[in-house]
């Protein structure tokens, strides 16, 4: 059971060449248009020369009965503990075992040090934290490479191992909006990013000629590699979620450093609840408080008090379950603007997004998993009556879609508050490693 990421990795490292198992199929959810494809022979190995089919997760119970499945391996992230056990109950009721693979069987071992950044939910601020960690190590003279959690939403056999070092690479690899959101800020910061499907091959390529690897996690998954320093972010805008979601709670329990992000816009009671939960499940971890201060490109003065459409990061709003993001905060608090509800103007598959995620109301998720969906997003924006657009996504949408109204982009970077800072803790860890030889 997967979502085009952890499932492929678990197969590659544990099942692909394992004669003790016969893998029958994958199921897919969360990401549109993954089901109906084939996990290709270029990746399935000698035991599966014709590849493996990918079915919709909705067909799971029928598949268990049809193929007499004995074991179902759950392999995706950012799901509540309750929903996870509902899925387990469905599997058990159909007669199969329900399995979770852990770090021992799924983490590969790099030859060089690796620092990982993870979270308890998607949309907490991993991306800006990863860039901050890269900045710290580059300032100390380390040469690094970033390995990003997978997003293989295109032609899987063409995405076995990808390298992104310049903006043209995004077009060359036909990247989705979600991929661009993650890769473009790294490229702008001068970081080389590796991603794809086979993380054994990716590891071999990424660790050539560098001093350190940075794992940039996706959703709230735990790393694909054994890590020397695990940094995990929690979100006081979703208090309690740090111990209510899988595998976010596992990440929290594994963390060497926990960063409580967005403290500048969170309520004090929520912040205290998050701190209590951290100390309860991981009492020895170091805790950093941080903000992600919001800036508006060009100031946005022309949109003060106007009607605006807010476009936010897709995964944060959908399976991340956030009702707002940085764009909404910028629009309402900084620009005092009137936020327009875009759902009546949604086109094509964007209409289905609002049906599937009814908590979305006054914001538009930047869905763009295919060229057709990117076009539907463009049409939705252009048909929404408003004075301007607030782009709260990590990548400026104007680079690849045409807007018929003024737009401003919102930016945010990690900013630690007080002591200890991230750099201070990294210095201490580096010193401890040096003293131990």
Image (cartoon, rainbow, N blue to C red):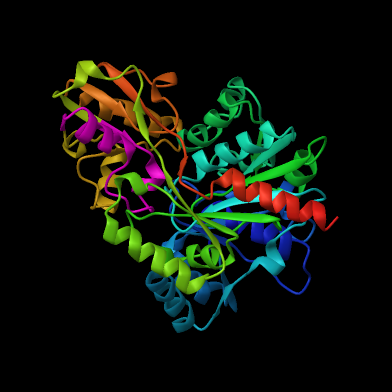
Q: Note whether residue 25 is visible.
A: yes
Q: Note whether residue 40 is visible.
A: no
- Which of these two is toward me, 75 or 131? 131
**Image spot of residue 411 (x, y percent):** 40, 30
Q: Quadrant of the C terminus?
A: bottom right
Q: Is residue 142 above or below residue 33?
A: above
Q: Is residue 110 above or below residue 90?
A: above
**Image spot of residue 142 (x, y percent):** 74, 35
Identify the image quadrant of residue 329: top left
The stretch drawn in magenta includes residue 75: no
- Which of these two is toward me, 426 or 83? 426
The stretch drawn in magenta includes residue 311: yes
What span is in magenta?
A: 310-339
Q: Residue furthest right?
A: 437
Q: Residue at point 21% right, 25% down? A: 383
Q: Is residue 92 above or below residue 312?
A: below
User: In screen coordinates, is 317 left or right of 189?
Assistant: left
- Count how many numbered circles sit on residues in the image: 0
Identify the image quadrant of residue 7: bottom right
Q: Is residue 374 above or below residue 361?
A: above
**Image spot of residue 85 (x, y percent):** 43, 76
Q: Residue at point 50% right, 39% down? A: 128
**Image spot of residue 367 (x, y percent):** 38, 38
């Amino acid at each position: 059971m997967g979502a085009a990421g952890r499932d492929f990795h678990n197969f590659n490292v544990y099942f692909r060449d394992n004669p003790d198992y016969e893998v029958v199929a994958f199921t897919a959810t969360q990401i549109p248009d993954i089901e109906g494809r084939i996990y290709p022979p270029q990746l399935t190995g000698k035991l599966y020369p014709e590849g493996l089919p990918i079915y919709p997760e909705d067909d799971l119970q029928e598949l268990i009965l049809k193929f007499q499945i004995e074991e179902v391996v759950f392999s995706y992230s950012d799901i509540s503990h309750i929903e996870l056990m509902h899925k387990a109950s469905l599997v058990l009721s159909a007669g199969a075992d329900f399995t979770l693979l852990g770090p021992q069987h799924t983490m590969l071992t790099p030859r060089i040090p690796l620092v990982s950044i993870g979270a308890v939910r998607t949309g907490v601020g991993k991306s800006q934290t990863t860039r901050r960690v890269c900045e710290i190590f580059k300032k100390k003279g380390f040469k690094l490479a970033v390995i990003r959690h997978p997003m293989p939403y295109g032609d899987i056999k063409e995405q076995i191992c990808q390298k992104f070092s310049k903006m043209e690479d995004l077009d060359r690899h036909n990247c989705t909006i979600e991929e661009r959101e993650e890769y473009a800020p790294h490229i702008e910061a001068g970081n080389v990013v590796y991603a794809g499907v086979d993380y054994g091959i990716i590891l071999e390529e990424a660790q050539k000629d560098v001093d350190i690897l940075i794992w940039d996690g996706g959703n709230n998954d735990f790393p694909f590699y054994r890590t020397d320093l695990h940094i995990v972010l929690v979100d006081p805008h979703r208090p309690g979620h740090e111990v209510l979601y899988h595998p976010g709670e596992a990440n929290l329990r594994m963390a060497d450093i926990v960063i409580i992000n967005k403290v500048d816009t969170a309520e004090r009671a929520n912040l205290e609840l998050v701190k209590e939960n951290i100390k309860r499940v991981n009492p020895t971890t170091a805790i950093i408080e941080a903000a992600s201060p919001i800036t508006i490109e060009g100031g946005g003065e022309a949109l003060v008090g106007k009607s605006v459409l807010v476009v936010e990061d897709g995964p944060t709003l959908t399976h991340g379950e956030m009702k707002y993001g940085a764009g909404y905060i910028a629009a309402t608090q900084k620009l005092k603007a009137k936020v327009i509800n875009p759902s009546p103007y949604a086109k094509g598959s964007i209409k289905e997004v609002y049906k599937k995620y009814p908590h979305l109301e006054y914001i538009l998720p930047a869905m763009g998993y295919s060229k057709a969906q990117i076009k539907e997003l463009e049409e939705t924006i252009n048909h929404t009556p408003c004075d301007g657009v607030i782009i709260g996504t990590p990548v400026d949408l104007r680079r690849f879609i045409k807007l018929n109204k003024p737009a401003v982009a919102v930016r945010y970077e990690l900013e630690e508050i007080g002591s200890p800072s991230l750099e201070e803790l990294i210095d201490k860890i580096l010193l401890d490693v040096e003293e131990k030889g």
